[in-house]
Image: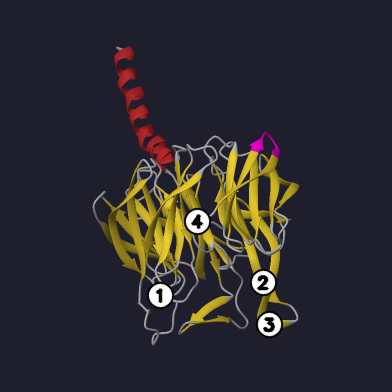
Amino acid sequence: MKRHLCWPAKLACALLALPLISAAVSAQLAVSANDNKAANVDGKGIVVQDAPADTVTIIDLGVSPPKVIAELKAPASVVGPPQSVAVSRDESIALVTGAIKIDPADPKKTTANNQISVIDLKAKPPAVIATIEGGSAPTGVSINPAGTMALVANRNDGTVSIFTITGKTVTPAGKIDFGNPKSGPSHVAFTPDGKHALVSRDGDHRISLLAIDGSKVEDTKQFMVAGFRPYSIAISPKGDVAVLTNQGGGQGDNDIISVIDLKQDPPRIVDTISVEQIPEGATMSPDGAYVAVTMQNGSARAKNHPNYHAESLLKIYSIAGTKLTLAAQSGFGGWGQGVVWSKDGKTLLAQSMHEKALTVFAFDGKSLNKTGTIKVDGGPAGIRTALD
């Protein structure tokens, strides 16, 4: 009799534990870096006087609706692509670059910074545990799939910084120098196998290919040429294709995104697609079936500019081989920046500097629908998840 009574009790305990296990599995962090120094007033960039500190907002993207779980202070910058954040695959640490700071000699100006913050995401609450130095104006940053290396594009000195990662300790391990301080390295993205990385160079309009063997990183000297000012890079988790944004000349012309065939040796640009003004961020869906691209769409221009639009644009393209097909699009807040996906590919967050907010979108494969807004302390300028 005791055995029959005990078994249901054990079963009840097991069933009660299931929701906790499910919640842990569904958890996903999105990390937004927010710049309080920079503002845009009727198309003119200004430095905010007596600006509060920049912030980093940590969002649980594994719940519906997504919710803010922590916010802390750390240097951030709208200068550079929105991949100014990197999150390790195990969500133990995040790296946030701060390319620009207030000029100590003139508070009405900014100057290059070199700070990269290491954030412990497992701490309660999350906290900055170290500040390390990159080159001049570190912008795009990525952590390799193994969580053992980080690469940082240094926009003002033509280099990529190399860091090794052991647990939560991030250690400088050298630099790649492209031999042209004006080459403008903007972002660096690892291939899924961790053996290569692509570097966008918006100063000399090249995309460089790096070779990686363990802790050794080399410039292969091979490069691609896509459009004018290559910027944000998104590599498919399948490792077969990458999508690249090109910032263009900033005159109000349509710009382009480029498709890179990673199966070719060396990789090559195989297609370009015309898009609205200033494509800013590109991010692959977790299954590699789609890529999301944000366009500022003239929303950071003066209202009397002939190419002004009140909203930025988010476009979703389906991917078949190296061909992109528009699947859905929607407007959102002005001066758009980065975008990230939830694990299931059904929710996206898109950043608006003007609104100091992230727009929450639902995506069903055919349409994008706004479902909410997340306000943050500062202009959201960079965002990543562990899946990017």
Mark nearer the N terminus (2 vs 4)? 2
Mark nearer the N terminus (3 vs 2)? 2
Give the image location of residue 367, x and y in percent.
24, 55
- Say how many tags the image has: 4
Between label 2 and label 1, give the one nearer the viewer.
1
Give the image location of residue 14, x and y in percent.
37, 27
Mark nearer the N terminus (4 vs 1)? 4
Residue range highlighted in magenta: 212-216
Q: Are marks 2 and 1 in contact (CB under 8 Å)?
A: no
Q: Are marks 1 and 3 in contact (CB under 8 Å)?
A: no
Report the amino acid beneath label 2: Lys
Mark nearer the N terminus (3 vs 4)? 3
State the separation of the CA atoms marked 2 and 1.
26 Å
The kind of secondary structure element at disc 1 is loop
Give the image location of residue 316, x and y in percent.
33, 54
Report the amino acid beneath label 4: Ala
Between label 1 and label 3, give the one nearer the viewer.
1
Give the image location of residue 378, x and y in percent.
52, 71
Report the amino acid beneath label 1: Gly
Q: Which residue is label 1 attached to?
A: 298
**Residue 136 seen from this side:** yes
Judge the density around disc 2: few (<14), some (14-19), many (≥20) Cα neighbours within 10 Å.
many
The kind of secondary structure element at disc 2 is strand
Is 333 left or right of 266, judged from the image as shown? left
Q: Which residue is label 4 attached to?
A: 226
The reply to whether the magenta stretch includes residue 101 is: no
